Image (cartoon, coloured by chain):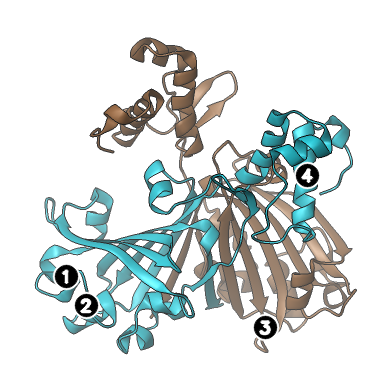
Chain colours: A cyan, B brown
Amino acid sequence: MESQGTGRQPKYQRIAVELKAAIEDGRYGPGDRLPGENDLMAAYAVARMTARQALGVLQTEGLVEARKGAGVFVREYRPIRRRGVQRLSAGLWGEGRSVWAVDAQGWDLEVQSVTVADEKPPEAIGRVLGLAAGASACVRRRRFALDGRPVMLATSYLDAALVSGTAIAEPDTGPGGIYARLGEIGHGPVRFREEIRSRMPTPQETDRLALSAGTPVVLICRTAFTAEGWAVEVNDMVLDSSAYILEYDFTS
Amino acid sequence: MESQGTGRQPKYQRIAVELKAAIEDGRYGPGDRLPGENDLMAAYAVARMTARQALGVLQTEGLVEARKGAGVFVREYRPIRRRGVQRLSAGLWGEGRSVWAVDAQGWDLEVQSVTVADEKPPEAIGRVLGLAAGASACVRRRRFALDGRPVMLATSYLDAALVSGTAIAEPDTGPGGIYARLGEIGHGPVRFREEIRSRMPTPQETDRLALSAGTPVVLICRTAFTAEGWAVEVNDMVLDSSAYILEYDFTS
């Protein structure tokens, strides 16, 4: 961030640029408290609104987060590395490990508020699963938290007729989870497609993921296919973007 | 979006919820103009600020975009499908096609403002490339636009000593691009890693990608490895999240 041309910038922008430079060069590290409005008013001889706007710029860019009553802090970025390809190898869920546990090694993992219900799925998902019009999907909703912090909402859709009577229709799917159970009834997935987008969260997502201002969500829609090319599961995931790096390794 | 409990919601939230429902059920389609502040003031008997806040909610969530002097429009989401795995198959760049052209089939593709320079790379990137301290990287910066709309900024880093004298150090890298040229000097990549994150844009990114308010950027950092496991290129990409779906296919 050069300081050239700052003469034409509004004052709050110039303050924001200086604060950003101080974060970038480590004068304020992850988790550190930034100067507050009063500090900035004194240091730069500006009005409260100008100080607030300057801090607002950093918040909107996701560099800092406001904690109620405590001030504004440099965001601690200790992301979860989610390995798209390795985590879904049959060697892992085949031996009864959870896909999710691969991401969360060394973390305190918690699956919260699991609900399972038979519902009419969104039209596009019903089509992908090859459901007849009006047919139900088994819908599994859950929230994942790491070290007590909610990081992902996930909703899986499967053919209700196919999975009825299996542990997939129970809150606890057992060792190896959904994919191991699908394997046991002859429909284990062998191929996956993940589609990734990003947008700002809805108010409900902000609430359920406890997102601070200026934090987008990453959407992953994963479809799991059997060897015959049949889509057996669609998993709609909403991730706190500040908590994740998604990694995909592949060969040319 | 249920209407239950809306009695406790602020008025602008209730208006926003109704407008969102109208977008979701198709009463306002992509590209349609939403009712303006004056329309909402009349329809809901509210003050201008309330009408503005309601429209602001939709804008922040990225559902609509304001066009100066023309009003607020439902965003046209016609995303580019970027296929992470297929697009980098050697079969494509091996025969002289551009990786990028695979994404852009049927679009009017343009690579804008290419600059090439020898520079000291960011420390982390120098480390990945195995550069000696103080050694230069060949840094290729460019912006990609589809149908005239800027959608991605990309910055590639390569060992300057390795690529000096090749077309990689020229603005036009020739058919098949960087990877074909690396192949010709015996360092063609065979394995790739893409790391994906998302955050709100910096003011510079907002400017260069002409992003509307409430639009995050997706960051892709790709590392290209030779058969010997040597990282020959790091490509730092910044994508307009409203323009892309990233797709990765893989087997278990």
The CA span between labels 3 and 1 is: 46 Å
Q: Nearer the viewer, mark 2 or mark 3?
A: 2
Mark 4 and 1 residues: CB-CB less than 8 Å, in contact? no
> Which residue is denoted by mark 2 in the rendering?
A182
Vertical order, B154 against B180 (above or below): above
Q: Nearer the viewer, mark 3 or mark 4?
A: 4
> Which residue is denoted by mark 3 in the rendering?
B226
Q: Position of residue B24 (x, y in %)?
A: 32, 36
Q: Chain of mark 4?
A: A
Q: Chain of mark 3?
A: B
Q: Position of residue B193 (x, y in %)?
A: 59, 74
- Describe residue A68's horizontal placement relative to residue A177 as left or right: right
Instruction: Name the residue at 45% across, 46% down.
Output: A201
Judged from the image, the secondary structure of the residue bearing numbered disc 3 is: loop
The disc at residue A17 is 4
Question: How packed is label 2: few (under 14 Cα within 10 Å), some, or many (20 or more)?
Answer: many
Instruction: Name the residue at 29% across, 77% down.
Output: A189
Q: Amino acid at mark 3?
A: Thr
Question: How packed is label 3: few (under 14 Cα within 10 Å), some, or many (20 or more)?
Answer: some
Q: Position of residue A161 (x, y in %)?
A: 10, 66
> Which residue is denoted by mark 1 in the rendering?
A170
State which tag comes first along the sequence, 2 or 1.
Answer: 1
Q: Amino acid at mark 4?
A: Val
